Image: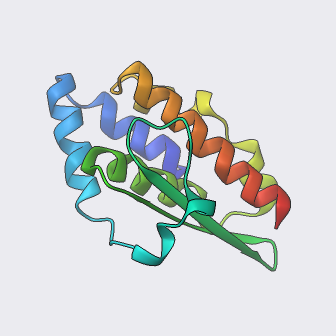
Amino acid sequence: MSSIEQYNKIITGFSSLQEAQAWLLSLGAQVPLHPGLRVKQNYVRGCQSFVWVDGTVTDNCCKFRLDSDSLIAKGICKILMDCFNELSTQQVLAINFQQFSTVAKTLSVQRQRGLQALINKIHNIAKNS
């Protein structure tokens, strides 16, 4: 089972939106602070909160770091890092917003747009590395 499928399964097990959002907050608490990541070139436009992304591709293996000033956004960052890290460029580019639809259902429309912006940024890093 892929990481995306695992996260979707976890989310479908919650009985309320509040429960799912509390879980996202707890995930956010697990993301370490990356002060060096918080630079203009890594900033992601279109997110409700301030979010930064960078990444590298070494031997066709992608590694991304994400950070935010918001705990719920950090929870989303944790999910994305778990789902995209250690994949090949081709695998990264094959993942799209629709695969995160279960996660997206727990988010406001603005946060859904931010999720799409994060996926787009990750794709751009993978394509250009």
- Which residue occupies the foreground of this view, 80 or 32? 32
* Residue displayed at 40% across by 35% down: 48
Q: Position of residue 44 (x, y in %)?
A: 56, 48
Corner quadrant of residue 54: bottom right
* Left or right for 79, reference 25: right
* Residue displayed at 66% across by 49% down: 121
What is the basis of the colouring in this image? rainbow
Corner quadrant of residue 102: top left
- Which residue occupies the foreground of this view, 90 or 57? 57
In the displayed structure, 58 sits above or below 120; it is below
* Residue displayed at 40% across by 74% down: 34
Corner quadrant of residue 45: top right
Camera sees residue 104: no
* Left or right for 110, reference 58: left
* Left or right for 63, reference 34: right
Q: Position of residue 85 (x, y in %)?
A: 59, 65
Q: Position of residue 55 (x, y in %)?
A: 64, 68
- Which residue occupies the foreground of this view, 10 or 110? 110
* Residue displayed at 66% across by 36% down: 96
